[in-house]
Amino acid sequence: DTGVSQDPRHKITKRGQNVTFRCDPISEHNRLYWYRQTLGQGPEFLTYFQNEAQLEKSRLLSDRFSAERPKGSFSTLEIQRTEQGDSAMYLCASSPPSGSYNEQFFGPGTRLTVL
Amino acid sequence: DQQVKQNSPSLSVQEGRISILNCDYTNSMFDYFLWYKKYPAEGPTFLISISSIKDKNEDGRFTVFLNKSAKHLSLHIVPSQPGDSAVYFCAASALTGNQFYFGTGTSLTVIP
């Protein structure tokens, strides 16, 4: 399967714990995005990488959230001191380098439940 | 501040008939629009897109119409099939930005 993959698919944690999610984009895609989706809502943008550079961050990305893409390939999203309000589906997407507009290819998501 | 709105949470259509899903946006800087389809437990899958220089784009059974003056776009599915049953998200982007803004989705049910 050469699509976007995310790990884990599900994560249950207790409030106050730290969690880390991983995203592996499609191999030739240099652009990578993280979104969060809560029930009844569409995906909300969190952050964007072009290669290893984090070029854009949403106001939704509080200082408890950090994302990295150290070698311009896979990316990690860490949430420190989780809160119940962090419970959501975390989606990763990637797009290729060519052209001004490109559709984003989404992974299956990581569903986080904070107890 | 919802910049992309899908005001119909759900839609039911008989198999073989036309499905029309609607989307409105408020930001006049948006110039690229997409529709995504989402099945349960999967990420959104790209369906069709349109840039603001066009008012219609067609791909098989799927056609997207863009009315820039009304800041409105629609997705037409003809003929509708039971496999089209899913949640459909409208998304918009500006050339100067990197993020997509998504609507809240419309759940389409195609009745056999």
Image: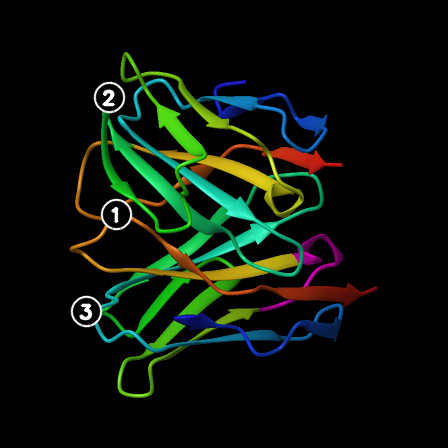
Magenta residues (range): B78-86
Looking at the image, which residue sits at the far right? Answer: B112
Q: CA distance from mark 3 to mark 2?
A: 32 Å
Q: Is residue B66 left or right of residue B4?
A: left
Q: Secondary structure at mark 1?
A: loop
The residue type indicated by label 2 comes to: Glu
In magenta segment, residue A25: no
Question: Label 3: how many residues lie within 10 Å, few (<14), some (14-19) or many (20+)?
Answer: few
Q: Chain of mark 1?
A: B
Question: Label 2: how many residues lie within 10 Å, few (<14), some (14-19) or many (20+)?
Answer: some
- Give coordinates of residue A113: x percent, y percent: 71, 36
Which residue in the structure is indicated by mark 1?
A: B98
Position of A114 relative to A74 (above/below)? below
The residue type indicated by label 3 comes to: Ile
Q: Chain of mark 2?
A: A
Position of B27 relative to A76 (above/below)? below
In the image shown, does A19 or A88 lie closer to the viewer? A19
Which residue in the structure is indicated by mark 2?
A: A52
Which residue in the structure is indicated by mark 3?
A: B53
